[in-house]
Image (tube, rainbow, N blue to C red):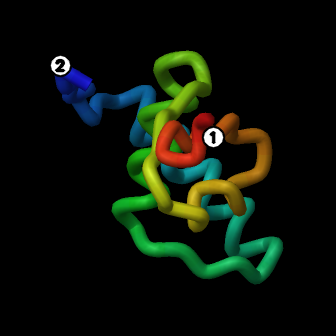
Amino acid sequence: MGKLICWPYEKPAAYEFGRIIAELRRLGRPMQQVDIQIAAIAFALGNCTVVSGDSDLAAVPGLTVENWADAS
């Protein structure tokens, strides 16, 4: 990984944050706000996030999670 891209947290991600946190509360699945923000940005950008060793994000309904640390 020679390049790190940082995506901004903008209005579409804020809307997704509200949707995700409401769904997680409905399901009784607490999660750290930073993880919800990462998921919200991923949904706002087209639903792909790359995570290394963070299993919490897998609990977000509908989110596609790729763990490149486990790729063989």
Measured from the top left, where is residue 16 in percent x and y? 54, 40
- Which residue appears at 57% of the width and 26% of the height? 48
- Which residue appears at 54% of the width and 52% of the height? 18
Amino acid type, callout 1: Val
Q: Does residue 71 lie above or below 59 as drawn?
A: above
Q: Secondary structure at mark 1?
A: strand
Between 51 and 24, the residue placed more toward the observer is 51
Q: How would you rate the neighbour count of disc 2 (Cα within 10 Å): few for under 14, some for 14-19, many for 20 or more?
A: few
Q: Which mark is residue 41?
A: none
Between 51 and 40, the residue placed more toward the observer is 51
Measured from the top left, where is residue 36 in percent x and y? 48, 57
- Which residue appears at 59% of the width and 37% of the height? 71
Count of labels in the image: 2
- Which residue appears at 44% of the width and 73% of the height? 32
Amino acid type, callout 2: Lys
Disc 2 to disc 1, C-alpha distance: 19 Å
Q: Given the current orientation, which residue lies at the most extreme right position?
A: 27
Q: Secondary structure at mark 2?
A: loop
Residue 14 appears left or right of 21: left
- Residue 4 picture quarter: top left
Q: Does residue 3 lie above or below 67 as drawn?
A: above
- Residue 49 visible: yes
- Residue 15 visible: no
Q: Nearer the viewer's eye, disc 2 or disc 1?
A: 2
Q: Does residue 35 lie above or below 67 as drawn?
A: below
- Residue 34 picture quarter: bottom left
Q: Which mark is residue 65?
A: 1
Circles 2 and 1, Cβ within 8 Å, touching? The answer is no
Which residue carries the number 2 mark?
3
* Chain-order first, disc 2 or disc 1: 2
